[in-house]
Image: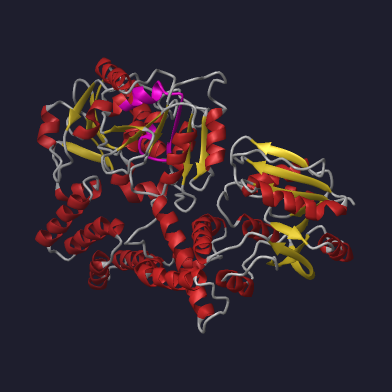
Amino acid sequence: MKLTIIIPTRDRNNSVVECVLALDHNEADVVVVDDGSVQQVVLPSDCARVIRHPRHRGRAAAINTGLKAARHDMVLIINDDIYAAPDMVLRLIDEFAIHNNPKLGVAARVMWDPDIPPTLTMKLMEEAKKFVAPILLWKPFVLSQGGYDENFTRRLEDLELELRLKQQGFELRTVETAVAFQQNPMRIRDLIEREFMEGASAVFLHSKFPYYMPQIDDMDALIRNENQAADADSAVEEISLLEQSGSDTLPDGASELFTHICRHYFLHGVFESLKDIGGIKQQRSDSTTATIFKEASRLEGIGEFDEARRLFQLVRQRPDEQYWDRAEYHLGCVESQLGNASVAHAHFKECLRRNPRHNKARRMLTNSTLYREIEPNVFEIARPASSSKVLFVVFGGLKNIVNAFPVVEALRNKFQAETVWLTSPAYAALAGASAADAILEMEPREIIPWDWIHSEGFTHVFFADPEGNQEEWEQSELHPIDFMAHKCGVQVETRRACFEPNGGALIQAEEFLRQNGLLKGAFVTASHGNGKGRHWPNSNLTRLATQLKMPMVVFGTKMNPEIPGTTTCTDKPFQVIAAIIRWSRFYLGPDSGLSWLATTVGTPMAVFIDPEAKNPIDTGLGSIVRGGKHDIREWDIYTSLQTVLTHIESRLPADIAVPR
C-alpha cells in the first residue's frame, strides 16, 4: 500500500500505541512524531517509525515533520487518541482513487468509542460533530503550499490549512462509511478549555483570513460576552453537576445551553488573546470619523466655511482622538477666514496643547520680521550674517530622534558651521551622542521664541519632524528619515544611526549588570514596547524566558506587566539602555520604541510587526536599517514561540553554559 500514515503525539503514550495497532494490518508506512513527550514514545516491535522532537513544537510542526519524512505521496493524518475501524483506510483510499484529484482531501467520520461510557458533553459533541477527523491528502500539493502553518501552536491548524488550500482549488469530502473512534473521553470542563484555545487561535486565523470569523472585529460584542461570564459559568456548573451524577439523558434545552457555552468560551479566548497582544481598545478607530474629516476639509477648500465648521466640530465630539488636533487646526483656519481672530487663536492654541509638534498651528500664532520662511517650517535670517549657525528642531519621539542622527550629521557637513539640536529634556541626553555641536533643551512652546533664536545667533532654522509637517509628509510619500533630510535639503549617506554611549552611561550599564549578576555577552534583551500598539504576546515572552539557555533582561516601564523569570530594567536613560543592548547576545522587541535604539548597535535583533497596522509612508524599522544593519529579522506578532526560540538559539554559542 503506497500510503504513509502520520500520527502526531504528545504525552499519550498508551493511546498512541492503540492507534498504531489499529492501523497495523494496512501494511502502510507509519510515522509517529513524538512532539517532545515527557516520556519518549516506545512502540511494540517495528510497527512504525518514531521521530522525536527534542522539545514541544506543536501539532502543526509535528505533522510537517511527518510529511517531510513520508515515503509516499498519499498521506493519512490521524490523531493519537483515535483508532480506525478495520476498513477505514481502504474506504478513504477508494474515495480518493475515484476522483483522482491531488487537490482533494477525504476525511473519515468520527464517533465515540462505544466501549467508553458517554458523558453529556460527549453526546453533545457528537451531535455537533466537534471532532478532528483523520484526513487523507496528497503530500506534494500540501507541501507546495507550505505545509501546515507552525505558528498555530494551540488549535485550528487544520482549518487554516483548509482555508489556504481552498484558495488553490482544494475540496474536502467526508466519507460517511469510513469510521474512526475517538478514545479520549471528555467532560464539560475539558471542552471549555478547548473552546478557549480555539478562540485564542482564531485571532491569528482572522489576521490571515479577515473574511472568516468577522465577530473577532466586533469589540462591542466581545465586551458584552465578557460581561456574561457569570451566566456561562453557571451553565457549565449545571452540566458538570449532571455529569457527576452519572446522568446519560440530555435534558430539555441542553443543545442550546451547550451552544451558548461553546460560543462564550470561544469569544473569551478571542478576548484574552487580543488582550495578550495589546489589541483590546475601548475606543476604536471609526472610518466614519475619517469620512467626516475628509468632507469637512473639502468644504473648507471650496469656501463653504459654515458647514465645514459644523463638521470639524462634530469630529471633535467623536472618540477618535487622532483627529482632534487636526480638527482644531482647521477650525482655527476657518475662523481666520471668517475674520474671527480671537476664536481662531484659541483653536490654534488648543491644537498645540493636544499636539505640541503641530508646527502649522504654531506658525499661525506667530510671525517674525527677523526671519523669513523660505518654505514651510524652514527659516533663514532676514539680514545677511557674517557666519552661519544652524538650529535643528526635532522634539521626539524616540523613532524620530534616532532617525535624525544621520540628518544632523549631513546638516553639519553641508553648512560647515555650528549645528545645534533643540529637543525636549526627555531626549536631550540621547541627542547629545549625535554629531550636533550642542544640545538645547526646551519643551515645545505655543509661540516660536524668535527673539531668543535671534539672540543666540542662528541663521538657519529647520523644524523637521514628520508629524509636525503631517500633510506635507503624507503628500511626499517619503519615509520619515528621508522626509527630514528633504526638509533640511541634505542627502544622508546612511539611514542607520550609530553612536557611542558616553562614559557615565557605560558606568551605569556596568553597574546594572553587576547588581543583577549578568555577564557581557551572556544574556538576551527584550522590550515590552510602548503600550500604544499590538505586540507579540506577553505570554510568549514569559515562556521564552523559561526556555532560553541564558538570562533575559526586559526593558519597559513600571506600568508594564512583570515577566516572570526575567531581570526587569525600567526607566533607565536611553544611552544606558543602548549600552546594555550592545552587551547582550540578542535583542527582541516590537517594531517601535526601544527597538530603534537596538538598530544603533551591532547586536543581532528581531522585531515584531502588526500586520494590521501597515503604514505606506512610515514603512517601519526594517526599511531604515536595511543595508546598514544586516542581522535583523522581522516577524509578525503571531509568530510562534518555537520559531523565535529556534532563531535566537541559532545565534547563541553551542557550548554556552550560563547559570540561571
Work out whether 494 lies above or below 93. Answer: above
Q: Position of residue 126 (x, y in %)?
A: 64, 71
- Locate the C terminus and report the quarter of the image it occupies: top left
Q: Nearer the viewer, residue 335 or 78?
A: 78
In the displayed image of the protein, which residue is found farthest to the bottom?
Answer: 252
Residue 627 part of the magenta segment? no
User: Which quarter of the figure has residue 459?
Assistant: top left
Q: Which region is colored magenta?
A: 577-596
80 or 62: nearer the eye? Answer: 80
Res. 232 image quadrant: bottom left
Where 547 sits versus 254, above or below?
Answer: above
The x, y position of residue 96, in whole percent, is 84, 62
Q: Residue at x 57, y 21 (%)?
A: 654
Q: How many marks?
A: 0
For image coordinates 44% across by 35% down, the residue present is 545
Task: Decide if residue 598 is on the left or right side of residue 381.
Answer: right
- Residue at x 51% of width, y 74% of height: 258
> Is residue 114 depicted above or below 487 in this figure?
below
Q: Give the image's coloring scheme.
A: secondary structure
Residue 142 in sight in this render: no
Farthest-out residue, front? 245
Visible in this render: residue 352? yes
Task: Tell me the residue at 59%/57% (across/down).
Answer: 156
Q: Is residue 416 left or right of residue 541?
A: left
**Residue 167 locus on image (x, y percent):** 68, 60
Q: Is residue 581 magenta?
A: yes
Q: Nearer the viewer, residue 42 or 322?
A: 42
Q: Position of residue 639 (x, y in %)?
A: 53, 45
Where 43 sits versus 272, above or below? above
Q: Quadrant of residue 211?
A: bottom right
